[in-house]
């Protein structure tokens, strides 16, 4: 096959496979030990292409192997595939096309991107696989009809091309799959590279002698962000199977993989004997995490008697369902799995079975809500908990309506947070308010082209690490980020590197800084660039490809992304070897070489205490997303309006402390806007966002006079209010707290809430009201006292109608007036409410908006109008509706493609029976603002409350957020909170 060619077969036309055995011989492959023979060789096919662009196979004709293609390992002249494509970009296949009798594979694509398939039929029911999609990104498959003997549609990532390649952004819908002997829709078994962002919807599966929906990580892959919705399965031996194995059949000594963030929504399956119970099987130390089942109804064959409930045998090198012995549960068997949720789901059997319906072994955070299980006649119990913690059954019954019998202790406390959201290595960042960002290198003014001269000038100028540490302490920062290996600063490496390729110093500036910071309880994070594009900035070549090539023993061009990726990759490992006390890496965007070589996972394995941050990109494997120099919001200091990542994900705002000029010292001494800078620091703290403040160190490390003066000012300014910033979370979000943002009479500010005492809160008034009165929504908190934090003086206040009112205010601080508010718990918020939605996305049902857990959320699946309905259980007084919308979009129209996905126009209805609603009792428009929002109603009694959302704020130009609505939590207030001390502090 050639680039820019489309093969079109019209209806009635057939391209037949030859039986003359004159196909191209399978090429040699030095990596064929890492995968099966058929995956390692590509030229032994009817049609082969490598590195092709813009190709297609379309039309209503047929490509038929005629039974002449081999299902095993082909000899010279034989072929085992119809279509075999590697490293292609832009493939279209379908348009009515049929592939028949393909041998081992009807189609195999490896290392490709931008694949589109519509109305493709594959019939390999008499031989082997349908379509293997391997190490491929940006795939859309619609209206496929695949009938295979072996695997039907399978996603893999092998090492056949000599590298771990990316996989992801895949959409499959409106398709039919059948796999006579094996797996219908499968991940693996070849699983070298990571998989993320897969969506499968409206798929029918009929027949699979292994798994209907199978997912294994055998060779080190991290599989995450995979979602199934609207899947119907019949005659499947194992309807759902997840397994982490330890085969490790991949290059570069892979570790053990992971499976996380998987959802199944609206799944129905009937089984076939011999059956394998639906299973989630993790490995010790490598557990499955974060799997959600909503409206998943399975019927298995059953028919077995009672048996031991001990953990069955397992072959960790085998991916097949039979590799695990007979499960001691007829239904779900969970082993080494955390944070698994079943909602509105069921499991039943066709023939009576003596085993329990569910066993959770070595599991935690398992939730069964409105779960139904059929009771076996001789089963000892319905749900077995073995070495399990945080397991809770709510409103769950057997098919006769009786309570499920549980063996073991339940714990219905707060579910455990997924580890990737709250890892111990992140503790120092979570305990931080901010950091000091240092851009300092060869091109710091006056710029140097000689590495030796620069180093001498640094040392002779009196550089000392203690200066930077002291200045960071003045800013009340807890970490420093050093950006010297920067594309605009000459790619300088301020440590003695053995790797040639760019400037490296003899003096260990980095090591000295790490030691000095550690002595004062601070961490140092190292900036790493991905970008060679500025290699000759200023007319000087900053990168030495010849020296690096000699070092590597091969030609490497450092001015290319791939070459620079290799060079920087080596530097990551050198730094890890040298500096165990480093806090981690601050990444200024990804490099494909790093990703294909699994760099980030290797960092965590080699240095478990290191954190990873990425600039302007929320990379799932990393700990934190940083947000660079965001502007355009009103007021200008309210930086979080530009943040688009929901808590508890670690987020950071990186901004210039002198708001004008370069990130590095360019010879100037710009002024520092105190109100803007302090406002940014405080508003970020008010949203649990870390403030990374950039200052422009000179060659000798000293800061220009205006920045140094600000640091000294900040040192004394922050001390009296430090308790309101450090050891707190942002108020009005997932941690509770008073409402932040826009208040009365032009006032603006944020609130914070103490981590160790939710009744200790703070109001930060950054812009005071034009009057002497301040009014703030109380979010259901009973107020006990209010005082000026700086002076300790009591403040006059009152509380009514859901509002805290402070009066007689004067003498506002020019930057931040802070009031300490003591509360006495919350009042008037109804619990036990059932929430449902008229539309929802897979894995994000309406019930998530009322489960008390901000880690789950309802998603409207971009459906408007849409409604949430609250069932209060019986008629109760309804006073207001509270909402925490998901903070995963900006709060203002930042650009055509960065818009707010928040409620705009709404209506509220009340009903006694859930059927008759009458006219809306409230219509209105919510502002596009962060934090808690309240909708006040004229008090009335009702059992059902409904909010109908008609529009959201995002414009159609923002295709990602247009009509999207997500709500973390919504609740009904039956009354407003009353003051604890009658307005007397």
Image: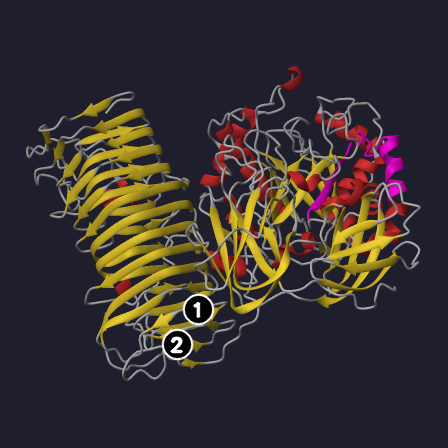
- Of all residues, the one furthest to the front in this rendering is 918
Callout 1: SS: strand
Q: Residue at x 68, y 52 (%)?
A: 429
Q: Residue at x 26, y 35 (%)?
A: 118
Is residue 953 visible in the rendered structure shown here? yes
Q: In the rendering, at what x and y percent does residue 155 appear?
A: 32, 46
Span of residues in magenta: 689-714
Q: Residue at x 69, y 32 (%)?
A: 631
Mark 1 = which residue? 368
Which one is closest to the eye, mark 1 or mark 2?
A: 1
Q: In the rendering, at what x and y percent does residue 789 appear?
A: 87, 55
For this view, does 405 lie left or right of residue 979? left
Q: Which picture quadrant has residue 297? A: bottom left
Mark 2 = which residue? 383
Asked whether residue 704 is drawn in magenta, I would say: yes
**How far apart are the alpha carbons under marks 1 and 2?**
10 Å
Q: Quadrant of the C terminus?
A: bottom right
């Amino acid at each position: 096959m050639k680039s820019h060619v489309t093969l079109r077969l019209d209806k009635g036309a057939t391209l037949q496979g030859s039986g003359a055995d004159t196909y191209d011989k399978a090429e040699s492959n030095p990596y064929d030990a890492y995968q099966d023979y058929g995956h390692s060789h590509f030229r032994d096919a009817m049609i082969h292409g490598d590195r092709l662009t813009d190709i297609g196979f379309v039309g209503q004709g047929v490509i038929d192997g005629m039974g002449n293609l081999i299902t095993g390992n082909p000899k010279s002249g034989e072929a085992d595939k119809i279509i075999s494509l590697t490293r292609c970009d832009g493939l279209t296949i379908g348009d009515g096309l049929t592939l028949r009798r393909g041998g081992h594979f009807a189609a195999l694509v490896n290392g490709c991107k931008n694949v589109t398939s519509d109305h493709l039929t594959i019939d390999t029911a008499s031989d082997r696989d349908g379509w293997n999609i391997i190490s491929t990104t940006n795939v859309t498959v619609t209206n496929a009809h695949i009938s295979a003997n072996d695997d039907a549609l399978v996603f893999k990532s092998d090492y056949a091309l000599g590298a771990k390649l990316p996989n992801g952004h895949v959409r499959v819908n409106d398709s039919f799959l059948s796999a006579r002997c094996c797996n219908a829709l499968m991940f693996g078994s070849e699983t070298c590279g990571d998989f993320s962002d897969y969506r499968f919807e409206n798929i029918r599966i009929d027949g699979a002698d292994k798994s209907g929906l199978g997912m294994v990580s055998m060779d080190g892959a991290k599989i995450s962000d995979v979602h199934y919705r609207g899947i119907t399965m019949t005659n499947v031996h194992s309807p759902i199977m997840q397994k982490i194995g330890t085969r490790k059949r991949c290059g570069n000594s892979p570790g053990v993989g992971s499976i996380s963030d998987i959802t199944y929504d609206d799944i129905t399956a009937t089984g076939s004997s011999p059956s394998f119970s639906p299973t989630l099987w993790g490995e010790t130390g490598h557990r499955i995490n974060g799997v959600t089942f909503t409206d998943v109804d399975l019927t298995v064959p059953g028919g077995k008697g009672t048996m031991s409930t001990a953990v069955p045998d397992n072959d960790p090198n085998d991916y097949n369902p039979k590799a695990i012995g007979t499960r001691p549960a007829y239904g779900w068997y969970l082993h080494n799995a955390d944070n698994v949720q079943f909602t509105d789901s069921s499991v039943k059997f066709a023939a009576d079975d003596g085993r329990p319906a569910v066993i959770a072994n070595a599991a935690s955070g398992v939730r069964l809500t409105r779960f139904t299980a059929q009771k076996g006649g001789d089963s000892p119990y319905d749900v077995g908990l073995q070495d399990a913690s945080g397991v809770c059954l709510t409103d769950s019954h057997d098919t006769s309506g009786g309570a499920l019998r549980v063996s073991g202790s339940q714990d219905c406390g707060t579910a455990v947070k997924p580890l990737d959201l709250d890892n111990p290595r992140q503790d120092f960042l979570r305990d931080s308010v901010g950091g000091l960002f240092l851009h300092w290198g060869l091109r710091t003014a006056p710029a140097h082209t000689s590495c030796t001269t620069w180093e001498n000038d640094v040392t002779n100028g009196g550089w000392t690490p203690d200066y930077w540490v002291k200045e960071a302490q003045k800013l009340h920062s807890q970490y420093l980020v050093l950006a010297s290996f920067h594309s605009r600063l000459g790619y300088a490496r301020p440590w003695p590197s053995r790797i040639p390729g760019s400037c490296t110093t003899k003096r260990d500036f980095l090591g000295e800084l790490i030691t000095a910071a550690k002595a004062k309880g601070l961490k140092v994070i190292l900036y790493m660039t991905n970008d060679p594009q500025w290699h000759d900035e200023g007319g000087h070549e900053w990168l030495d490809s010849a020296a690096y090539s000699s070092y590597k023993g091969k030609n490497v061009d450092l001015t290319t992304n791939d070459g620079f990726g290799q060079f920087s990759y080596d530097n990551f490992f050198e730094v890890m070897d040298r500096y165990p006390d480093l806090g981690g890496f601050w990444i200024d965007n990804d490099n494909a070489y790093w990703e294909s070589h699994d760099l980030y996972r290797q960092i965590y394995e080699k240095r478990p205490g290191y954190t990873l941050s990425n600039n302007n990109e929320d990379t799932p494997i990393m700990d934190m997303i940083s947000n660079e120099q965001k502007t355009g919001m009103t007021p200008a200091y309210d930086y979080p309006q530009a943040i688009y990542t929901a808590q508890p994900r670690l987020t950071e705002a990186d901004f210039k402390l002198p708001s004008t000029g370069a990130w590095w010292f360019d010879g100037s001494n710009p002024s520092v806007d105190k109100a803007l800078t302090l406002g940014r620091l405080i508003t970020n703290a008010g949203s649990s966002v870390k403030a990374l403040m950039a200052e422009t160190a000179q060659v000798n490390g000293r800061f220009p006079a205006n920045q140094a003066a600000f640091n000294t000012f900040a040192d004394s300014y922050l001390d009296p209010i430090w308790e309101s910033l450090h050891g707190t979370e942002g108020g009005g979000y997932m941690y509770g707290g008073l409402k932040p943002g826009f208040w009365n009479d032009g006032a603006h500010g944020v609130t914070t809430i103490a981590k160790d005492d939710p009744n200790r809160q703070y109001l930060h008034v950054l812009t005071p009201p034009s009057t002497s009165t301040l009014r703030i929504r109380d979010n259901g908190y009973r107020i006990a006292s209010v005082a000026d934090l700086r002076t300790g003086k009591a403040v006059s206040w009152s509380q009514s109608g859901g509002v805290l009112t402070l009066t007689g205010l004067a003498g506002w601080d020019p930057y931040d007036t802070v009031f300490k508010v003591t509360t006495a718990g919350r009042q008037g918020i109804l619990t036990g409410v059932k929430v449902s939605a008229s539309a929802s996305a897979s894995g994000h049902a309406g019930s998530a908006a009322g489960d008390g857990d901000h880690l789950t959320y309802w998603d409207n699946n971009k459906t408007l109008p849409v409604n949430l309905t609250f069932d209060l259980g019986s008629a109760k007084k309804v006073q207001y509706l509270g909402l925490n919308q998901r903070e995963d979009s900006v709060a203002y129209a930042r650009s055509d493609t960065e818009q707010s996905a928040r409620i705009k126009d709404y209506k509220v209805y009340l009903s006694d029976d859930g059927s008759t609603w009458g006219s809306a009792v409230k219509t209105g428009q919510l502002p596009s603002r962060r934090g808690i929002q309240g909708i006040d109603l004229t008090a009335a009694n009702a059992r059902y409350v409904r909010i109908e959302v008609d529009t959201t704020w995002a414009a159609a130009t923002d295709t990602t957020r247009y009509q999207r609505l997500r709500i973390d939590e919504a609740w009904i207030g039956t009354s407003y909170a009353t003051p604890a001390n009658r307005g007397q502090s």
